[in-house]
Image: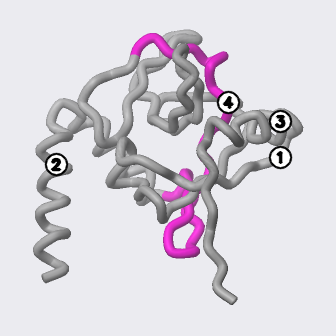
Amino acid sequence: MIFKRIRPPVDIIAPLIIEEIGAGNDVKIGVTGFSMYPLLRSESDMVILSKPENIKKLDVVFYKRPNGQYVLHRIIRKKGDVLSIAGDNETELEHPVYVSDCIGKMTYYIRNGKKHSVNSISYLLYCHFWKFIFPFRHIAVKAIMFIGKHRRK
């Protein structure tokens, strides 16, 4: 018997995610889309979300946009309860996003079955580097994709 992993659209499972996180449980969800590349890879990586407590700059949060879309992006700036957010593969800031819009905060990501903490030194170095090169991200992402494409050949 062959099993296929089914990933329902996030807007369908969002009420369950909100309920579980609200009850104090962590939730594991699959990543779709390329806005958080190169940190997160679409259709293969997963993230573990916890309650969005003590949200700070460089955290990755799961939030709901005013148009109803659910998004997982990084906080670039925080002033009080107002956030400026962008995906790691984006060059435009989304502003304002409010702390109250945040449903969960990424505490781990999972790649190839291995759990990676957002508190690890390598992850924190990545975050600071990626924030530093924010204006030049599109160049960095193209370079990473070029290297990866030629490494596979």
Query: Is 1 colored magenta in this rendering?
Result: no
Q: Report x, y in % for residue 147.
A: 13, 67
Display colour scheme: one colour
Which residue is denoted by mark 1 in the rendering? 25
Which residue is denoted by mark 4 in the rendering? 103
Q: Amino acid at mark 4?
A: Ile
Label 4 sits on a secondary structure element that is strand
Which residue is denoted by mark 2 in the rendering? 140
Q: Amino acid at mark 2?
A: Ala
User: Compared with residue 42, is residue 17 higher up or lower down, i.e. above or below?
Assistant: above
Q: Report x, y in % for residue 67.
A: 52, 17
Q: Quadrant of residue 80?
A: top right
Q: Report x, y in % for residue 112.
A: 51, 74
Q: Amino acid at mark 3?
A: Glu
User: Compared with residue 84, is residue 9 higher up or lower down, i.e. above or below?
Assistant: below
Label 2 sits on a secondary structure element that is helix
How far apart marks 4 and 1 lie (CA) works out to 12 Å
Which residue is denoted by mark 3 in the rendering? 19
What residue span does the magenta drawing correspond to? 95-120
What is the total number of numbered labels drawn onto the structure image? Answer: 4
| Disc nearest the viewer among 3 and 4 | 3
In screen coordinates, is 42 left or right of 92? right
